[in-house]
Every structure is written in C-alpha cells, then in structure tokens.
Amino acid sequence: MQQETSEPTSIVSPDIAKIINDGQRLITFIAKDGDTELDPDVTRIIIDAKYKMSNNQWSAEDEEVFLINYDKLAKIVYPVTVESLHSIIPIYKGKKRLTTRAESAVTSYRRYTMFALILLLIGQVYWLCGHELQGNLINIMADRETLRTNLEDMEIDSADRHGQLMKIELVNQKLDANYKLLVLWNKAWSFGLEFSDTMPRYLQAEYESKKNRYDLDRNQNTTALQELELAKTLHQVRMVLFENTLSANFILTTFQGYILPLLYGLLGALIFVLRSLMNEVKTMTYTPNSEIKFRLRLTLGALGGMIVGWFLKPDEANAIASLSPMGLAFLMGYNVDLLFSIMDKAIDNIRKSIEAPAKR
C-alpha cells in the first residue's frame, strides 16, 4: 500500500498572494529604514514564500508556516503596518511619482489651517472694529452731554461760552463720523440692508394729526410745521441710531461669546491635528483610518472652544485668569481632553450635591 504524499499546488488565493507581497514590503522596510533587526528564520520563510508562489510550488503546509511567521513579522514592526507603509512611502508609476495619502492629508490640513486662520483674523478684526466704534460712540455721547450741561451753567455773555460751543461742534462731528462708520460696519453682517426709520403707528398718527391741524392755517403755523418736521426727523434719526447701536451690541456679544471662541477652538484643534499628523508620518504609523479621529478632533475642538466657559466655576476661572477667554478657547481646542476632565468634575459635583441630602 503506497503512502500518499502531499503534492504542491499552484492554487494561491488572492488574499494570500496579497499578504505575501505585504510581507516582502515589511521585510524591505525593516532592512532599509527600520530600527529593529530582522529575524533570520522569519525572513527566510517570508522570502521563500514569494519564490514558491512564483514557481507554483505552494502547499497547505507552506501557507500555514507562512501565516505564523507573518504574524511574528507584524509584531516585530508594530506599530508600523503595511497600510501605513502604503500611505507614506511614495509609489512610482513609470517615471511619475504618485502622491501618497499622507502627503494628501498634510496638504489638506495645511489648507484647512490657513483657511481657519484667515477666517479667524477676519472675524477678530471685524469684532475689534465694531467694539471700538461702539465704545467710542458711547463715550462721545457721554462727553457731549457733559459739555451741554456745562454750557447750560454758563452765562450767555461768558467768555468761555464760545469755546464751549466750538467743543460741542467738534464732538458732534466726531459723533457723526463714528456713527457713519458704525452704520457701514453693520452693513457688513446685514449684507447691505439698512434699518427702517418708520415711526410706530401711534407716533405716526399723532404726527399726522398735528400736521393736519397746522395745515388748516399754514400761514400762521409755518414755524410750528417746521418744528414738527424737525421733531419727526430727529425721532427717525434717533430710532435708526438706537437700532444700529443695539444691533451692533448684539453682534458683538454673539462674536465674543460664540463665533470667535468656536474659531479659536477650531484653530487649536487643527494645530493638534497637524502635530499628530507630523508625528505619525515621522514614526511611519499614519493610515487612512487616522482621518476619522482627526475629523472628530476638529469637531470636538471647535465645540470645546465655544462651551468651555459654561463649565468653569468662579474659583476655576480665577485660577486661569492669566489666560484670555480666546486663549482659553484655543487651549481647549488643542487639548479637548482637558475639557472632558472639567465636564467630568462638574458632573461629580452635581452627583455629590444630589446624594448629600439623601444621606442626611
């Protein structure tokens, strides 16, 4: 009775063929760029697998031995993987060098960072201009009221009265210029729309009633009609003034409390992503799966920069008083884990406050 012998077979599954080629790439990486030493036995089996596959001498025993040694090789080079090598090491198609996934990621996140930085600078400058205009307008109006009060206390023939009138005129010019700039500032966020000077229905009806009464005898009521029109114009101008100042205050508060912290948090997260990407490329561990955690980091960083102020108690805020609110938002975006620690601490404090009465 003849004993059956295991005949080599030329059938190699596509998955095994791919793993054999991956093993060759890992061996090449260790020999060329790796810091670890090659295991002679593992190296021999990985290399033999390539030639056995090429010469149609592949068998089930060869596949078993190869997979065991491939597992050893993967552990030797870890955290470097075949996927990370494919993503980082350039590949040539003829004489043309193909862009790697890592290079594409670096280019993309550099662009995202520059875009976020430019957007942040525009928002910061816009907020700063509006803040200065709003503050100047309030101060100028206060100065004008002070000058008017002093003018009322002066005698009509006083030598200082003329100088006081000149000061009031100068302040009025500053007020007009500042207000004009504030109107232009408001047009930026309102996309060119202007505020309406339509009077409330009651005041409009009161104005029309007086005007109709004066129109009955226009010759005798000429002065009264002029004063009525001036009063109407003054009321409309003041309405638009207050609408502009109130709207500017609302937009400034929105920028300071939400938009700018969000952008600072996003910028911090982008810098963290660039640093992580640089480290992964340097250690040859970048893979396309890293994109998932990078994108999540951007979302968490932006939200963290915006909401960090919600979870700080007064004593904690005093502890970081050396940081500006925007600096804190940037820091939270860069290290969102710190925000999670603050949130966990807040949750623990709430739980303790709820459990304390129950124990009593």
Image (cartoon, helix red, strand yellow):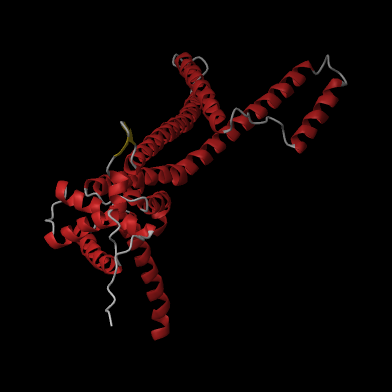
Q: Find the residue positioned furthest to the bottom.
A: 360
Location of residue 198 with respect to 227 vertically, above or below: below
- For image coordinates 38% across by 50% down, the residue present is 291
The reply, left or right, for residue 193 in relation to residue 339 is right
Of the pair 10 and 343, the residue shown nearer to us: 10
Q: Find the residue positioned furthest to the right.
A: 216
Location of residue 322 with respect to 353 vertically, above or below: above
Q: Position of residue 310 (x, y in %)?
A: 42, 56
Quadrant placement of the N terminus:
bottom left
Of the pair 272 and 20, the residue shown nearer to us: 20
Of the pair 315 and 155, the residue shown nearer to us: 315
Q: Position of residue 34 (x, y in %)?
A: 16, 50
Of the pair 145 and 334, the residue shown nearer to us: 334
Q: Position of residue 162 (x, y in %)?
A: 48, 13
Q: Find the residue positioned furthest to the front.
A: 1
The reply, left or right, for residue 310 in relation to residue 337 is right
Q: Is residue 325 visible to us here?
A: no
Q: Position of residue 289 (x, y in %)?
A: 37, 53
Quadrant placement of the C terminus:
bottom left
Q: Quadrant of residue 357?
A: bottom left
Q: Is residue 91 visible to us here?
A: yes
Location of residue 14 with respect to 236 vertically, above or below: below
- For image coordinates 82% across by 30% down, the residue present is 209
Location of residue 252 with respect to 350 vertically, above or below: above
The total of numbered circles placed on residues is: 0
- For image coordinates 73% across by 22% down, the residue present is 229
